[in-house]
């Protein structure tokens, strides 16, 4: 049987335990030189933008870049821990959430939706959305263009069951479109501008009134749980959104850099830049509600199984730093 210790003895013992535990649980800060931030990118995306804005020269952490064809495979890599962060459109996070991916949206921007287009060949007999019934549409599965197709069809009394969706990445879709193997192509800039200028594509309808224009910086949960990488994530976000603001006021300079990086014609890049204008916005209730509306539309269309709670895939820890 233990003897009862005086209260002061218990308090001293408790203080010693708390002090010892606190010291043991507090990790040493990881030096910036030892932190490697793995960034997922799309060609002509974040790396090109940050470089053009002069915001990579003195970046205090090591960066490793990986290039992806679109948002969905990028988020698969983030969920698996193969990358730490990457930028995507409004739909990939919803598909990732439906798969219970280990990711969270940690930053957001909003741009114009004129370039989120459903294109048809110049001589196509299709004149309106209703004419798409029974037709073949090329689109990247789980991309922002996929979301736009769904909402556009719904707004015109149709569903994805009334058309045939050909799930193709942009490069393959461009070939299918120009060779007449599909009736329409749902895509975003710079592909929209490229198809308009080089293949004489015609815009059947664009994202106005349907697409919400949001884009996200999305991090893997593994990176978010790594205290050593959190300062690097914050630094990357701050610089990325500064670069967006720079691009908005230096459009010709950004178009030249973008063209040089991607091999696009300068005229294509400039057309894309002039109608994009992505700028940072807060992740707030209105944004989450807009994304939830899109997620619910996919569920109702039976494209996704079950209901997605988008709010559970959002992390606002860096919002104060981005303000």
Image (spheres, rainbow, N blue to C red):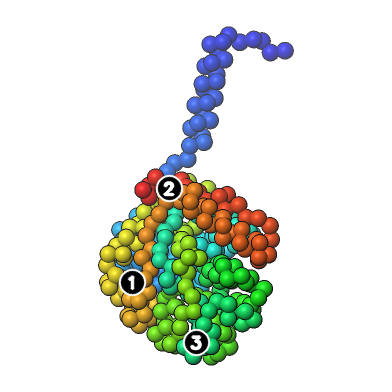
Q: Position of residue 225 (x, y in %)?
A: 52, 48
On screen, residue 264 versus residue 312, left or right, reads: left
In the figure, 194 relative to 64: above or below?
Answer: below
In the figure, 110 relative to 172: above or below?
Answer: above
Q: Residues within 10 Å of mark 3 (few under 14, many from 20)?
A: many
- Distance in Å between CA atoms under marks 3 and 1: 23 Å
The numbered mark, 2 or 1, whose residue comes first in the sequence reads: 1
What residue sits right under mark 1 in the picture?
274
What residue sits right under mark 3 in the picture?
121
What residue sits right under mark 2 in the picture?
318
Give the SS element for disc 2.
loop
The numbered mark, 3 or 1, whose residue comes first in the sequence reads: 3
Asked where in the image residue 297 lies, by quadrant, the reply is bottom right
Instruction: Name the quadrant of the N terminus.
Output: top right
Q: Position of residue 65 (x, y in %)?
A: 44, 66
Q: Is residue 23 visible?
A: yes
Task: Pick the residue in front: 55 or 35.
Answer: 55
Give the SS element for disc 1.
helix
Task: Pick the residue in front: 209 or 25.
Answer: 209
In the figure, 295 relative to 254: above or below?
Answer: above
Q: Residues within 10 Å of mark 1 (few under 14, many from 20)?
A: few
Q: Is residue 220 visible?
A: no
- Distance in Å between CA atoms under marks 3 and 2: 44 Å
């Amino acid at each position: 049987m233990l003897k009862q210790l005086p209260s002061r003895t218990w308090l001293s013992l408790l203080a010693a335990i708390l002090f010892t535990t606190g010291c043991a649980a507090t990790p040493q800060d990881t030096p910036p030189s030892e932190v490697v931030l793995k960034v997922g990118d799309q060609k002509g995306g974040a790396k090109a933008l940050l470089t053009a804005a002069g915001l990579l020269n003195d970046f205090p952490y090591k960066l490793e870049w990986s290039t992806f064809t679109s948002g969905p495979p990028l988020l698969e890599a983030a969920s698996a821990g193969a990358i730490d962060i990457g930028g995507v459109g409004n739909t990939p996070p919803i598909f990732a959430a439906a798969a219970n991916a280990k990711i969270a949206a940690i930053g957001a921007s909003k741009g114009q939706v004129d370039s989120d287009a459903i294109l048809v060949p110049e001589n196509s007999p299709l004149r309106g959305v209703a004419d798409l019934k029974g037709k073949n549409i090329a689109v990247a599965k789980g991309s922002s263009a996929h979301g736009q197709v769904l909402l556009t069809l719904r707004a015109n009394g149709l569903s994805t069951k009334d058309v045939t969706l050909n799930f193709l990445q942009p490069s393959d879709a461009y070939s299918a479109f120009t060779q007449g193997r599909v009736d329409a192509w749902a895509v975003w800039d710079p592909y929209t501008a490229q198809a308009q200028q080089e293949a004489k594509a015609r815009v059947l309808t664009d994202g106005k009134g349907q697409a919400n224009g949001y884009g996200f910086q999305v991090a893997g949960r593994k990176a978010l749980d790594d205290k050593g990488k959190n300062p690097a994530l914050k630094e990357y976000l701050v610089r990325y959104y500064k670069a967006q603001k720079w691009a908005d006021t230096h459009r010709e300079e950004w178009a030249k850099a973008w063209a040089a990086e991607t091999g696009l014609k300068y005229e294509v890049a400039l057309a894309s830049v002039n109608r994009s204008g992505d700028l940072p916005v807060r992740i707030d209730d209105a944004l989450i509600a807009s994304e939830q509306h899109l997620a619910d539309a996919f569920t109702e269309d039976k494209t996704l199984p079950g209901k997605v709670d988008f709010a559970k895939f959002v992390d606002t820890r860096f919002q104060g730093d981005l303000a």
